[in-house]
Image: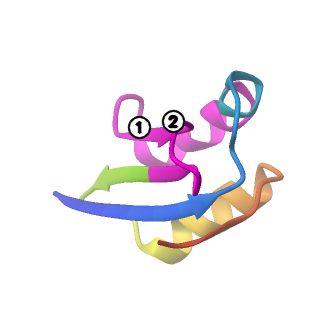
Amino acid sequence: MKTLQFKTNINCGGCIKAVTPTLNQEAGAGNWQVDTANPDKILTVTSDRLTPEQVVEAVKNAGFEIQAA
């Protein structure tokens, strides 16, 4: 398993709820989390198969900003 981290603008429970279907589909439920307490709103994804580019595309498609941490 590799761990990927990104800075995002996912900053509240509503945002997490909005991005959950996309990230569950791409990474799988339980394989990602957003640290909303961190000023950079760090998204951590654990996956064997996802590339950073795939995660960025999925989050952008869900309507959020994202960049490599």
Query: What residue is at 68 percent from the left and 38 percent from the top?
Result: 19
Mark 1–mark 2 contact, CB under 8 Å?
yes
Residue annotated with mark 2: 24
Amino acid residing under circle 1: Gly
Q: Which of 35 and 51 is in front in this view?
A: 35
Rendered location of residue 66, percent (x, y):
66, 65
Magenta region, residue range: 17-43
Left/right of residue 44 with respect to residue 20 in the rendered view: left
Rendered location of residue 38, percent (x, y):
51, 46
Q: Can residue 11 be seen in this view?
A: yes
Element carrying mark 1: loop
Marker count (numbered): 2
Rendered location of residue 23, percent (x, y):
55, 43
Q: Can residue 49 be seen in this view?
A: no
Residue annotated with mark 1: 28
Left/right of residue 24 with respect to residue 19 in the rendered view: left
Rendered location of residue 12, percent (x, y):
70, 30
- Quick one: which residue is furthest to the left in this view? 1
Query: What residue is at 49 percent from the left and 51 percent from the top?
Result: 43
Query: What residue is at 54 percent from the left and 68 percent from the top?
Result: 54
What is the crowding at mark 1: few (fewer than 14 residues within 10 Å), some, or many (at least 20)?
Answer: some
Element carrying mark 2: helix
Left/right of residue 23 with respect to residue 10 in the rendered view: left
Marks 1 and 2, how far apart in space? 4 Å
The image quadrant where one finds the N terminus is bottom left
Q: Is residue 25 depicted above or below 8 in this figure?
A: above
Q: In which quarter of the image is residue 60?
A: bottom right
